Amino acid sequence: MSRPLTAIFGLAVAAAAAAPLLRDATHDSYPFSTYPMFARVLHQPQLTFAEGVTGSGQARRLPPEMVVNDEPMQAMRTLKLTANAGRRALKQLCAAIAARVAAAPIYADVRRVRIARARFDPLRYFEPDSGPQGQEREQLVECRVRRAR
Amino acid sequence: MQGQARAVTERLSSWWFTPMPARRLALLRIAIGALALAYLTFRAPNLASVAELAPQQFAPVGAAALLTQPVPAWFVRSSVGLSIVLGAAFTVGAAFRVTGPAFALLLLWVTTYRSSWGMVFHTENLFTLHVMLLAGSPAADALSWDARNSGRASPALDEEDGRFGWAIRAMSLVTVVAYVVAGVAKLKLSGGTWLGGELLRAQIAYDNLRKLELGTRVSPLGPWLVRHREVFPALSVLTMLVELGAPLALVYRRVTLPWVLAAWSFHVGVLLLMSIGFFYQLSGFAYLSFFPLERGLALLQRRLAKA
């Protein structure tokens, strides 16, 4: 490439990387991001999660790999977006999670999958006298884990 | 006035086209290419798994915004596979005029598509942009398959020219810009509140909380530290100094190493407190463009020769 072209190319990439400074920080994109991580004020955030329920009624959280893949944030977004998409989408996701649970020997005791959401106070969550409690807990959908006999 | 403008332009131009050795640019290509190749190989299952997400979750960003619907699963998997092949060619500098830009574009596509499902990831931006800059530069003019087999005269490894320097300058500039943008975002979204420390404390607490509620393990350091609110104002101020102070690393050579160490430490802190691994920054490779790599290599070669 000639010098003028290399200058234009390099400067264009740098300018594009800086361009997010001119837009609303909440309008994120890729790869020219506004990098809004850890920047927002939190007000008792609501979290959607998946649980496996055993035959005795005990519930334990299902990890991201059971929801979609090994990326926690992708699993979190999938759960949240599905919860907002309505009951049909929730049933489909529940069934998909249940199929993964059925194929995972570590969850052999899980009979049902439940998707629920609750509000949490992040700072009180880790206080010794408060403990990890969610408020306004709401069950969204539940489905059976079907295993081949 | 015109004379001043011309003087500024010439100064900027001479900074941008600072003569730098062919070997330094080549070493950046090899190091960053190898890291990109390792990343793509190990993360291939995750990168390809987006093909299984529900279509209604598709929220394209960047170049993917041109799409009205998700692409077929075979296309996603093929893209990831081909990116690994091209990544190898990029790293060794084979047919670089074609494989360089092809790899950069495919890497951009694969990482953009991954961020197009409701969650924009921020761990791949910088290394994608660095690969793009390397791809558009003569990064395979030395220490490459092409240089060895082209039959034409290659530049001497220590030949210094501005045609090698601009890409290295651009990489450092893009690194600095990324940190500044992140710092400005914090001020835009929460104003001066961010410097008080409570917002950072709540963010660290929330990140650990949601990972625990999602059934993943977290480092015990984050949950422990959020109980000590007194450290957070200092952590917030230090974070802001690293982010908004980044341009100083470009302007003042004495500031470069301390800033790089501070930025790297910031990412170590993010890993320890929130289990979030910015692999490119943690590896140190994000900051290689700030340093004369060829001198480090020469020193290593001399030490090995003595041993």
Image (cartoon, coloured by chain):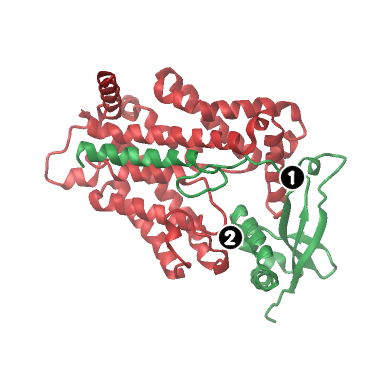
Chain colours: A green, B red
Say if B242 sits above or below B81 in the image.
above
User: In the rendered image, which quarter is residue B305 located in?
Assistant: top left
Q: Is residue B47 above or below residue B21?
A: below
Quadrant of the image containing the N terminus of chain B: top left
What is the quadrant of residue A77 in the picture?
bottom right
Q: Which residue is mark 2?
A: A69
The amino acid type, in three-letter code, at marker 2 is Asn
Chain ID, mark 2: A
Compared to A87, does B83 lie above or below?
above
Outermost bottom residue:
A149
Per the image, label 1 sits on a secondary structure element best described as loop
Amino acid at pointer 1:
His
Q: What is the secondary structure assignment of the residue under circle 2?
A: loop
Q: Chain of mark 1?
A: A
Position of the C terminus of chain B, as image quadrant, is top left
| Residue B227 tag number | none
Q: Which mark is residue A43?
A: 1
Viewer-side label of 2, 1:
1
Residue A59 location (% of width, % of height): 80, 62
Seen at 29% across and 23% down, the residue is B5
